[in-house]
Amino acid sequence: MITKEQAITSLQKKLELIQVLGTVEDFNKWRQSTKMTLISIYGATNERVLELSRIEAYRDFGFGGTERVLEAKDEAQSFIGGLIEDCKDFGLLQKVDSKKDGVNVNVNQYNNQNQSTNVNVNLELFIEAIKDELKGGQVKELKAILDGDEEPEQKKKSFVEKIKSFGSDVASNILANVLTNPQVYEQVTGMF
């Protein structure tokens, strides 16, 4: 469980990072990383996560050209600052209810020395990381493979090939988003 102090520290780091964002791509990467942090603090269905998703930076080269990076940075800075103040004033009002929001995987491993390792990972983190890295059509293509009638090994092979076809950075970005999520990061670093 994340404490009030951990949440404040994590949000303050995200607030500091806003200052160095210069491009739409930088902002979108920051927003994805921050979204995963908010999911760890508040839960995936919390309004705060949805509110962050509504802050958009974009570039439109249509008539006159428009870039909305500075406005998005200002909105995000105000939003994260407000979350920090709320945490300081009221604490963490909502706890992550992973049993309600997602599927939990519990893995127990036993070796010859009778040691055990318990890993709890909310699969929703993986699903969000995949959806955030892929376009809608790409997600549908992956879903079609999973819904197909192929044998599990063939599905796995088709799935991997499809992800590779989306570009070399896609798989590594998904993995990086998952592993840098504070909820996963704390569990993984304790294992090494």
Image (tube, grey):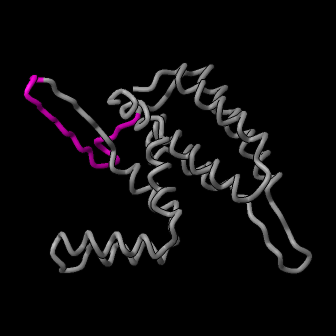
Q: Which of 96 and 144 is in front in this view?
A: 144
Q: In which quarter of the image is the N terminus?
A: top left
How many numbered marks have been drawn onto this rendered protein structure? 0
Q: Which of 110 and 15 is in front in this view?
A: 110
Q: Where is residue 123 in the image (x, y as percent from the top left)?
A: 33, 50
Q: Which of 66 and 90 is in front in this view?
A: 66
The magenta region covers 96-114
163 lies above or below 33 = below
Left or right of residue 127: residue 89: right
7 lies above or below 168 = above
Identified at 51% across, 66% down, the residue is 168
Left or right of residue 124: residue 153: left
**Image quadrant assignment for residue 48:** top right
Magenta stretch: includes residue 173? no
Identified at 15% across, 24% down, the residue is 115
Q: Nearer the viewer, residue 88 or 10?
A: 10
Q: Where is residue 83 in the image (x, y as percent from the top left)?
A: 63, 33
Q: In which quarter of the image is the C terminus?
A: top left
Magenta stretch: includes residue 103? yes
Q: Position of residue 153 (x, y in %)?
A: 19, 70
Identified at 9% across, 23% down, the residue is 114
Identified at 16% across, 35% down, the residue is 108
14 lies above or below 90 = below
Q: Position of residue 77 (x, y in %)?
A: 74, 40
User: Which residue of the protein is positioned furthest toward the right in this rendering?
Assistant: 64
